[in-house]
Amino acid sequence: MSLKQKVKLVKLGKLKAVENVMNFSKKISTPKVKDLNIFLHLNEEAIAQAKEIDKRIASGGSVGKLAGLCFAAKSNICVKGIVANCGSKVLENFVSPYNASVINKLIAEDAIFLGAVNMDEFACGASGETSAFGPTKNPVDPSLIPGGSSSGSAASVAADLCDFSLGSDTGGSIRNPASHCGIVGMKPTYGAVSRYGLIDMTMSFDVIGPLARTAEDARIVFNVIRGQDNFDQTTREGGKEKGGKTGVIGLVDVSDYCGKEIADLIETRTKEIADKKGWKIKKIDLPLDIALETYYILVYTEFFSATRKFDGRRFGLKIDEAGGPEVIRRIVGGSEITKAEHEGKYYREALKARNFIREKFEKLFAGVDAIILPTVPRTAHKVGEKISIKDMYGYDVLTVLANIVGIPAISVPAGEVEAGRPVGLQVLAPHFSEEFMFKIAESF
Ligand code: GLN
């Protein structure tokens, strides 16, 4: 059932908000689902909130656009009274003192928060395995990773434990697990959604976005959470959209970066839909050769800076002592890159590369309306399988450019390869052209 249909039923009183909460809660508490290790903390007040919504409906009062819908949020998004541990021992007992702006917006539309879900520690990871509270498993096949870092956000939607969820995307963390779990994950334009109440990973890349079963559902949630927010000075309304002028879609040549079966599937699907819709396809190149180097130098530097506040005095434990291996790697790396004796040389080079990449995209978008490429270059590995750091970072090669440039991107299911492993197709659009991007995504 689509979100639109469900809200309609709730508003008509044909489906009680309470029933909706109970249905999900029952499933969440079954041993099979618990074994997937998706939820970290449940909202004890969900039923009471649902009752209040049902009462308002019964008495003819007005309710919001998301009335009765249940959602999960990544454990780095603050929800008042709920532990936001970021998948880390460092913040194991950190109870959020306030709601993130996105949470306030969803609650104002009468959506019901079900609980906080598992994630890679401090959003550092691409598999869902770096959480201090154990790996999340992929509902499509529990022997596989669900992807990350928004592992629980994707798995909760794929396992049908909520109507939609929120994740955060710094270099692909919404799109990557959406791709591996066979659902939709959307990364908004940087600044389109408030980061107030999101525990930072890399401030100049981070953005909160929705994960859902369809592009239409994701669009509905995005339109609720988007918009300028006085608590986050980087937010903007957006204004007029740029998409849809040329009728041309850029299909990225990923042959040097991606498994052949995946690349072929994306190309076939794109051609199929382009034929139907009358789009022209133009083969294009992206600066994929410098994507990871640029991304990781900036991430290490900003992550090092962002985590200095976790010194064990105000929030939980000292991160340099209680953080897991991937977190420590980034802290050590970030501290090295920013050493005075390097005089900012690596960081400055990365900023130059970032500008170069931005200009490249600006030129590309003069000739194409949207860009299509696979979301992840390979399929999900087995939980616990030994993966080199290089291969783990390699998962991000096709997603990080959108964050470096700050443009919106969405991953939609494209099909399966290797007997049942989901593959996602990614659509990229110019800054603040989300409506257009959703239109393209919905065609798939
Ligand atoms: N896998 C990427 C990283 O580890 C992306 C993380 C994210 O988007 N939060 O940095």
Image (cartoon, rainbow, N blue to C red):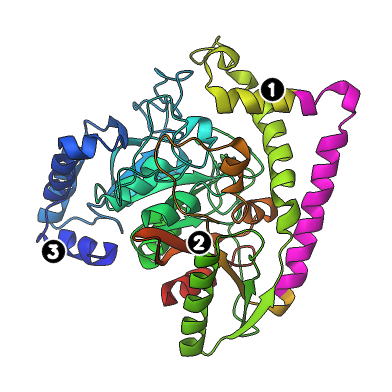
Which amino acid type is marked by label 2? Ile
**In the image, which is nearer the foreground, mark 3 or mark 2?**
2
- Image location of residue 83, percent across then percent down: 37, 25
**In the image, which is nearer the foreground, mark 2 or mark 1?**
1
Residue 193 relative to residue 234: left or right = left
Could you say which disc has been placed on residue 442 in the image?
none
Q: Which residues are magenta?
A: 336-365
- Secondary structure, mark 3, is helix
Specify whether tag 2 is near ligand 1 (CB below 8 Å): no
Residue 118 relative to residue 206: left or right = left
Question: What residue does disc 2 label?
Answer: 410
User: For residue 369, which quarter of the picture?
Assistant: bottom right
N-terminal of the pair, mark 3 or mark 1, is: 3
Question: Taking 68 as reference, is 372 above or below it?
Answer: below
N-terminal of the pair, mark 3 or mark 2, is: 3
N-terminal of the pair, mark 2 or mark 1, is: 1
Marks 3 & 2, CB-CB < 8 Å contact: no
Which amino acid type is marked by label 1? Val
- Image location of residue 337, percent across then percent down: 79, 29
Q: CA distance from mark 2 to mark 1?
A: 32 Å
